[in-house]
Amino acid sequence: MLNGLNGYDIDVEADLSSGLQAFNIVGLPDLSIKESKERVKSAISNSGFSIPPGRVTINLAPANLKKDGSQIDLAIAVSMLLAIGVIEYLPDEKTVFLGELSLDGRVITFDGALPMIISLKELGFKKFFIPNAIKNEVNVVQGIEIYPISHLKELVDCLNGVIEIKKEDIVKVNLDEEIKYDIDFSDIKGQENLKRAMEISAAGGHNLLMVGPPGSGKTMIAKRLPTILPKLTFDECIECTKIYSIAGKLKNNKLVTQRPFRSPHHTSSPISLVGGGKIPKPGEVSLAHNGVLFLDEFPEFSKQAIEVLRQPMEDGKVTISRANSSITYYSNFVTICALNPCPCGNYGSQTEKCTCSQLQIQRYLSKISGPILDRIDIQVEVEPVKYDDLSSKEVLETSADIRKRVEKARKIQLERYKNEKIYNNANLSARQIKKYIILDEKLEKIIEFAFKKFKFSARSFNKILKLTRTIADLDGSEEIKEEHLLEAIRYRSLSNKYWS
């Protein structure tokens, strides 16, 4: 059973006693488990077995924990068949049965298989009987035995020694294989400043905001950010797959090996962004974990939807609280925001006339609060694409070329922070900033001048230092130089133009 990403084991006990025909499940089952008695009875009957007349009681222990999910069907069926003597072999206490049952006895898939099995492995369980359909999701977990089954009858015959089910081989995932994308940075004409900002964002894991008129390429370039991000590590693949498994969004029940790119519509509710529901499911911020969350038309999101992003953007995790529990999901992602400078999109344009009043512009931009702006490391003003750039025949830099520089910078960061619990510059704490980012006297004076002129907050000040470190890493320089700091300050000065 799962509580967020963490699981706990449920002992299923069955008792058949004399009395009026009845079938009861006790131990705080929810509706999905209460309904399982009909599925289990039909599955047993349609597998060629019969339940003797009498009173059947199923106990789910521990009794103080609420139980939910159809994955417990198989364990209920096995305990019943043991109680009535159909199964003669008593399974080892370290054996787990997971799977939903169809009415004809087929063992079918369920959500959250990978995090369940990893949690149960940590609790000491070694042998797992699971639906055949999810074997590709869980066959990467080392140190356990997986037995995929398709039908309840097949499992009974196996436990009784009539047939042997082949143990699933543990698969070693090949993450060195090149990921092929249909899009590439070489598709983008012009916008060299924005490309540079995207490269810095990818190299250090920094959030980025783009302000520019419609048709300037903001969406096009945002969609290409995953093509220059480093490949997922195995641990990152497991983290992403856990989230997608719980959300029921795994494709072909296979491990997630590509960095997620999530682009929720601006009508999305706060719950759809951070997650929730009666049984809390991951939201967009968790589905974007280890990848990119792209928020197009950012001010068109509701004020509440924008504000709920504060905690996940800052902490790299999101906590969903309920009356009797709280659930935490991963949410360590790169935020990319795109917006027009005003409702019509032409404010500040040299060629088009803006039709918005000053009040309309203020209302439009005021939906993005100071605390949210503070959490965005890089702010870029995007100019319309020039004709000369569009008509140029010049061979442009590919995503693969940019990714090589990004990966080189990330390797520098991994080596630098090998004794810390962080992987990139964006995740540096205030203490770690003091330890790893050293400015000489000249640079101290420059940042002091910028701090006073642009009225930076303490968080903005730290963001500049993190950006400076990333720019130096891209340059292959351990020493932070003046040009690195000045470029970082430039990426933090847009707030004064639009939100001062």
Image (tube, helix red, strand yellow):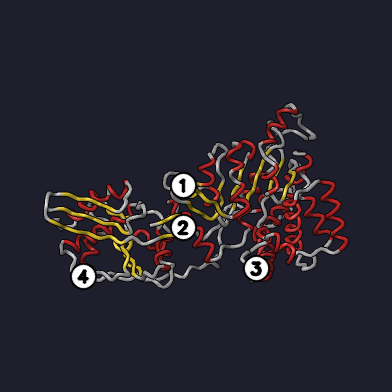
Q: Which residue is mark 1?
A: 322
Label 3 element class: helix
Q: Nearer the viewer, residue 116 or 46?
A: 116
Task: Please say if the residues under marks 4 and 1 sit with CB atoms less than 8 Å apart.
Answer: no
Residue 414 badge = 3
| Disc with the residue nearer the chain's start (3 vs 1) | 1
Q: Which residue is mark 4?
A: 89
Task: Please say if the residues under marks 2 and 4 sit with CB atoms less than 8 Å apart.
Answer: no
The quarter of the image holding the C terminus is top right
Indicate left or right for 289 with 104 as reference: right
| Disc with the residue nearer the chain's start (2 vs 3) | 2
Q: Which residue is mark 2?
A: 5
- 133 shown above or below 284: below
Label 4 element class: loop
Could you tell me the amino acid type at mark 4? Tyr
Indicate left or right for 453 with 285 as reference: right
